[in-house]
Amino acid sequence: MKKFISILSISVFAIVLIAGVAQADTSSHLLGRILLQVEEHGEAWYVLPETAERIYLADGEVAYAVMSAFGVGITTADLEKIPMGINEQFIVADTDGDGLDDYLEELLGTGIDNVDTDGDGYLDGEEVANGYEPMASGGVKFAIDESFAESMKGKILLQVERKGEAWYVSPDDGKRYYMRDGDAAYEIMRYLSLGITNMDLSMVAEYDSRIDCGSSYNCYLAALEAELDVEIQVQTNIDFMGYGLVTNSILSNDILSEQGGAYEARYMSYTLNQTFDGEVQEEMSGATIDCSYEDKQAMIDAIADFSLGNFGTSSLDFAECETYMVESVESVDCGEDLSCFSSSVSEGNQTTVLVYRQEDGDAFRWYASMDTVSQWTYYPAHVTGRSGDILATSELVEQMISYSYNGEDKESSSVLVCPQETDEHVLAYVESQLATGAGFNESVHHSECYYE
C-alpha cells in the first residue's frame, strides 16, 4: 500500500511538472502569434510579445485598436531591413496587374498604372517578392538584416516617419505584411494564424487591462467601438475670453456590462493640471468627471467632438455624471488594533488592519478548529484604489493571508471586495466583528460583496 502511494505521489508530481513545463513552453513560443481556436468558431487571439498575454481580435475595429495601442514605432531605414511579404490573398485592387496592391504601390512610390516602374524588365510585384528594389534598375536588392528581422518577428510596426502605416512581421517567414486598415489587419493576421486547442489556449493568460492609447484619439475611438477598456492622455487648448486655457487630462472608458445585449460603461475625465493665461491653476488638479452611460454611439460622438475641440457643457447630457475632486488622503496602518481602524475610518483615511480569527468546529463542520489571518483595507470614495483606478464609491477589501485547520498551516489569496461601503457601514461592521469574532462575513456588509 505504501509503495502504491509513493508511486502515485511521484506520478502526480510528474504530471504537475510536465504541465508546468508545457505552460512555460506554450507561452514562450507563441509570442507575437495569432491563434485560432480550432475547437470553437475560429476566434482569433493575438499574443502580445511584451507580456505573453492574449487579446481577443473580434473584428477589424479591435484589430485597429490593437495596432494603434501595441504597435512599435520604427524608422523607414530599419523597416527596410525586414523582407516584405507579398500574397495574392491580401490584394484588394491591382490596377496595372503587376502583383502589388494599389495601396502598397502608393506606399512604395511605384506607379499603380506601370507594371515595371524601373524599366528593368521585371514586374514590380516580382521584384518585391524576391527582395529587389522595384524603383532601382540593375538588380538592387533591399538591405535585409536577418538578425534584426528575426528580433521583430510577431511585432506590429508603425512607420513613425510617415503616417503611422502598420506592418505585421510573421513569426513563420519573418516577412512584414502591410495592414492598410483594421479590416485588412484582421484578415491578414487571421491568414497568418496558428490553430490552437482550447486546452493549450487556456495556458496563455488573457489580457484584462486597459489599452493605453497614449495620445491617439483614433486608437481611443477604435477601442470604444470595439468595446475595450481604454485610456488616453490628452491636452486641450481653449480660447476663453481671449485667454488661453490649457488642460492636461486622462480620459478612460471601462465596460461594466455587455451581457444579453445590454451595454453599460463608465467614462472618467481626470485633470492632471491646468493653466489659465500661463498661470497654473493648482485647485483644478484632481478635478474629475465620472459618468455612467448606456449609449455607446453617443460617447463615440462625444469623444470625436472632443478631439476636434468641440466639447461643451451639454456633450455628456446622455450620461449620468457627477463631478468631484480627487484628493490625497492619509494612509494609516493600524497593525492589529481594530479600535485604531475604527477611528481612522471615521476620519476618512485609507486604513489597513491585520485581523486574527479563531474558531472551533462543531458537529456540522468538517474541521475541528480554524484559525485565519486577514488584512482589511478601507478605501474612501474618490481616491485611487488598489488597482490604480479612481474609485466611484468607497470599498472595504478583506484579503485572507493564511489559515490553518486541524493544526495544518495553509497560505491563501482569497479576496473579498465590498463596494459602496460608507464610513458608517464599515464602523458598524467592525463593531459587529468585535462582538462576534473578527473574520470574513459578507452577510453583515451593507452592499453586495464578491470574491476575487
Image: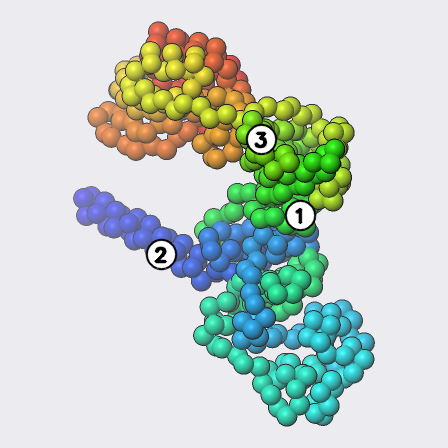
What amino acid is found at the position of numbered circle 2 in the picture?
Val
Q: Secondary structure at mark 3?
A: loop
Quarter of the image holding residue 386?
A: top left
Q: Residue 431 at x, y = what percent?
A: 39, 8
Whole-Å distance between the Cαs marked 2 and 3? 55 Å
Residue at x 81% of width, y 80% of height: 113
Of badges 2 and 1, the one in the foreground is 1
Q: Which residue is mark 2?
A: 21
Whole-Å distance between the Cαs marked 2 and 1? 41 Å
Q: In the displayed structure, would residue 243 be above or below residue 54?
A: above
Quarter of the image holding residue 265?
A: top right
Q: Which residue is mark 1?
A: 217
Left-right relation of 201 to 14: right
Q: In the displayed structure, would residue 321 be above or below residue 192?
A: above
Q: Secondary structure at mark 2?
A: helix
User: In front: 7, or 309?
Assistant: 309
| Contact check, label 1 and label 3, Cβ < 8 Å | no
Q: In the displayed structure, would residue 249 be above or below residue 422?
A: below
Q: Is residue 149 visible?
A: yes
Q: Is residue 200 visible?
A: no
Q: Secondary structure at mark 1?
A: helix
N-terminal-most mark, 2 or 1: 2
Q: Which residue is mark 3?
A: 281
Mark 1: give few (<14), some (14-19) or many (20+) Cα within 10 Å.
Answer: many
User: In front: 23, or 389?
Assistant: 389
User: In this figure, which colouring scheme has been used for the structure?
Assistant: rainbow
N-terminal-most mark, 2 or 3: 2
Q: Quadrant of the N terminus?
A: top left
Mark 3: give few (<14), some (14-19) or many (20+) Cα within 10 Å.
Answer: some
Mark 2: give few (<14), some (14-19) or many (20+) Cα within 10 Å.
Answer: few
Whole-Å distance between the Cαs marked 1 and 3? 25 Å
